[in-house]
Amino acid sequence: MRFSPIPRGVYPGFSALDPEALAARGIRLVLADLDNTLVPYRVAQPSPQLTAWRDALDAQGIALFILSNSRKPGRAQNFAQALGVPFQGRSGKPRRRGYLQAMERMGCTPAQTVMVGDQIFTDTLGANNAGVTPLLVEPIQLAGNPGRYLRYAAETPFRLLGKRRPFL
């Protein structure tokens, strides 16, 4: 377990993560952030593209699990139910506890798990801290919150380093 903000690759979006390639690396569990990773903020239903990706993961024997920090009551639960996957809301990322609880629930080890997220200081940092491989995706949308622009600007050096060390 190491404290590092550097991801194992930076990908255009979740659909760029090939389920067959993940399975070939021994991955059995994909933990995924919800907002700005799988769907834009406030979107309540999964897209056909997300549903197809979930099905492709499932065909490779890989479970998709939503690991969200959302504080909105029912946000992660309702979305996960619509997608038909397990979830954990208010996960406390970047703390290790949420990652470890999710893996325990799913019967997987850190070596069998990746975390897909759009933020360095929650998703990537927490995954590395828990021994999980962090796969960073570009955020779906930045508009609407000036704080996001500042946060993503601060993440730029780590994103650049992550691009040099792809997992897939």
Image: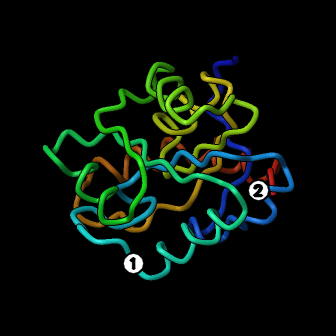
Which residue position holds label 1? 47
Q: Where residue 72 sits in the image (x, y, percent)?
A: 15, 45
Q: Mark 2 or mark 1: name the one nearer the start of the chain.
A: 2
Quadrant housing the C terminus: bottom right
At 69% from the left and 56% from the top, the residue drawn is 61
Distance Cα–Cα, label 2 vs label 1: 21 Å
Give the crowd class for mark 2: few <14, some 14-19, many >=20 residues within 10 Å.
many
What amino acid is labelled 2 in the image? Leu
The local secondary structure at tag 2 comes to helix
- Circle 1 — which element? loop
Residue 102 x %, y %:
49, 32
Is residue 165 or residue 21 the one in the foreground?
A: 21
Q: Residue at x 53, y 43 (%)?
A: 155
Which amino acid type corresponds to the residue marked 1 in the rendered image? Ser
Residue 13, picture quadrant: bottom right
Disc 2 designates what residue?
22
Instruction: Mark 1: give few (<14), some (14-19) or many (20+) Cα within 10 Å.
Output: few
Q: Residue furthest bottom?
A: 48
Pick out the residue farthest to the left. 73
